[in-house]
Amino acid sequence: MFDLTTKARTLIRVSGLKMYFPIHAGIFRRHVGDVKAVDDVSFDIYEGETLGLVGESGCGKSTCGRAILRLYDITAGSIQIDGQEIGDLPQSALRKLRPTMQMVFQDPQASLNPRLTVEGIIGEPLLEHTSMSRAERKARVHELMDAVGLNRSFSDRYPHEFSGGQRQRIGIARALALNPKFIVCDEPIAALDVSIQAQVVNLLEDLQKEFGLTYLFISHDLSMVRHIADRVAVMYLGKVVELAPEEALYGEPLHPYTRALLSAVPEPDPDLTIEDRIILKGDVPSPANPPAGCNFCTRCPAVMDICQREDPEFREVQPGRFVACHRYGQSAENKTENENENETAA
Amino acid sequence: MPDGAPKVLDVRNLNTVFRTRTGEVHAVNRVSFDLEKGELLGVVGESGSGKSVTMMSLIRLIPSPPAEIRSGQVLFDGMDLLEVDDDTLRDIRGARIGFVFQDPMTSLNPVFTVGFQLREPLMRHMGMNRREADRRAAELLELVGIPDAARRLRDYPHQFSGGMRQRVMIAIALACDPEVLIADEPTTALDVTIQAQILELVRELRQKLGMAIIWITHDLGVIAGIADRVMVMYGGQVVEEAPVRALFKSPRHPYTRALLETIPHVRGKRAERLEVIEGQPPILGAAPKACPFRDRCAVAVEICGRENPALREVGARHRVACHLADADTGAGSGTGAEPEGAHV
Ligand SMILES: Nc1ncnc2c1ncn2[C@@H]1O[C@H](COP(=O)(O)OP(=O)(O)OP(=O)(O)O)[C@@H](O)[C@H]1O
Ligand SMILES: Nc1ncnc2c1ncn2[C@@H]1O[C@H](COP(=O)(O)OP(=O)(O)OP(=O)(O)O)[C@@H](O)[C@H]1O
Ligand code: SF4
Ligand SMILES: [Mg+2]
Ligand SMILES: [Mg+2]
């Protein structure tokens, strides 16, 4: 496991990232508002670690992951990879950097071209980004198939001839083809059965060790994220509300949303009655029209007056622990009138 | 059965086969189980293990063709549901046996208001007039925790969130006070905080209404929290069935054991490495002549490839289909594991 005590090198630095999707209406397709899918998010990812990104459906996890890889032209903010700013690079300039950052998708079925053989699929990025000969490519594909535990003799088969877990291995092999440093894994196990999920997670862990990979692991499965992540960021309605090392976050969650989320996970033990289980009332508001103040204030069991007026700053409340909640940090009373534009912590 | 709670449903030797262009799929093989009055039976198993097809077969909601129920009995109130005529069956479905399906968007009709869909079974099965049905419909929506219920009856399904649609589905299933509720993955598509709301609701409703429930899920955490008894399916068969505590504390089937070991937890000790069940689930091309789990089983012996083990009693209400079920001592299995409550 990644050692957080040694001086970690920052590989990815995200600051003030915003990704808005415009909403158009009427016959003139007027711009009437925005879906604030990612709304001012800042965090670092250390080299060699797995940062887990959790949160409920629609909170902006995938958008965040895709924005970091610049699969979108972002609305605002900065993204640095190994010190290089890529937030404002045009897509043409990004092409050169693509090999270093890859993505593994949720649906192994939909993300693989059904007309290509396994060899074609895994070899596609090699064809596009390298000048390898056919024989070299084949050798590399075989090497990758070994690494992800696929039998080489399957290289001429098509995706539909594989099981879900095997298809996910094909997707992972393709993501590894160009020796990336950083991989965004977007719900890589969500479509798989419980007994197959463990196989894929173990594989991702082995590959990380072997190749020194850095992962952003997106999932709504809180127990799997606990297992695989070194640090965990919790998103709610476009914002990261808490970020902490795995042990601290699961052992002593600070943000009221993190607490509710963790207490809602059913435990596979009939003897365990979770005492203060927090049942949140109501539904998640729309990201097109988030509430004023703290975006969790409409459902928060610990809500205070100030929460309805002011957006809490995302700040480091203990070394390495970040929280965006008025309950932590400065006492709420002192923060009445002065409208402060928050600088987000990096 | 030692504890004399009356059975509301008794399924015996159910077999369902699909005929497809590429051959037969033996989706449900000799499935037998019963359901006691007021109890919650959890059904778990991997995708394709036959959970949905079993439940759809027993009330004949399975489309045939391609499906064919080859044999079996489904005893409900002195009748065999596989034998009764269509009119009788229609009266039972939706009135005495309620359903909640896997995906609420496909089972709620988008062109009718929620009020219409709630009134319909009340008027058809309970002989209510429009006004009575309206009042009852509002009560039902309130019962499942939808605020401003009377007004929301005029809304269409798309005007509700996913969690609310699932509540509406539950309200419709409960409309005629069924004796049995069959819920197929009713919370799988929902977020954990919304799932927690629904599970809380089900606990409340059971206390208030006392119906028997069959709850299908792949989430062992959900099962541990709400079930009295659990049935584990694998490859179209029941491989283990036990009171919930016995299943989690002393599982006897190698598949159940392995399954419990592969899942990570959010509380307690964090495992260094996840246990895995190697291999893939079986393809059910023919009636199984061997144990369906043999290729993935860590303790399989020669006979496992030759003979399909039958379900055998290994403890109080604890049945296992494994050739080695008796071989290991399984200290404490089954004993003292009867769940309390629920057996009204
Ligand atoms: N291309 C797009 N155009 C408009 N809105 C979008 C687009 N992509 C995402 N959104 C919206 O942005 C919000 C965040 O979506 P996103 O897919 O990032 O959520 P998520 O956290 O990954 O959810 P899930 O767990 O369901 O995958 C949602 O409200 C979604 O509807
Ligand atoms: N219409 C159909 N035609 C052919 N085979 C089918 C059909 N419907 C289901 N099956 C097969 O029957 C078997 C059992 O399916 P079933 O839907 O009961 O699984 P399940 O346990 O409910 O899985 P899940 O957890 O994915 O819902 C599977 O092998 C499936 O492929
Ligand atoms: S800031 Fe207020 S509303 Fe937001 S989480 Fe904290 S206490 Fe709750
Ligand atoms: Mg997503
Ligand atoms: Mg099913």
Image (cartoon, coloured by chain):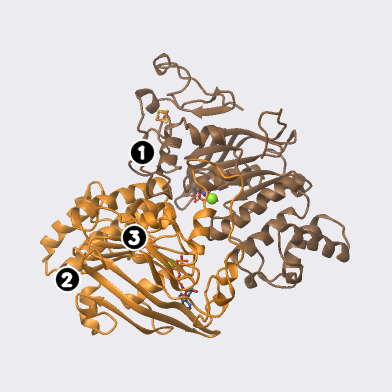
Q: Which mark is residue A278?
A: 1
Is the residue under label 3 in contact with that under label 1 (CB below 8 Å)? no
SS of the residue at dot 1? loop
Q: Neighbour class for label 3 at 10 Å: few (<14), some, many (≥20)?
A: many
Q: Residue visible at 72% across and 40% down?
A: A89
The picture places residue B101, in percent across and down from the top left corner, at 36, 65
| Residue B321 left/right relative to B155 | right
Tell me the amino acid under the disc marked 3: Arg
Q: Which residue corresponds to mark 3? A: B229
* B70 lies left or right of A170: left
Ligand 5 quadrant assignment: bottom left
Quadrant of the frame with the C terminus of chain B: bottom left
**Nearer to me, A305 or B87:** B87
Indicate which label's residue lies in the foreground, 1 or 3: 3
Residue A68 visible in the snapshot: yes
- In the rendered image, residue A306, in percent from the top left (x then y), is placed at 38, 23
Residue at image position (66%, 48%) is A205
The residue sitting at 64% across, 64% down in the picture is A166
Q: Chain of mark 1?
A: A
Residue A171, percent from left and from top = 67, 59
* Label 1 beta carbon less than 8 Å to ligand 3: no
Q: Is disc 2 placed on a helix, strand or loop? A: helix
- In the image, which lettered chain appears orange? B
Q: Which chain is brown?
A: A
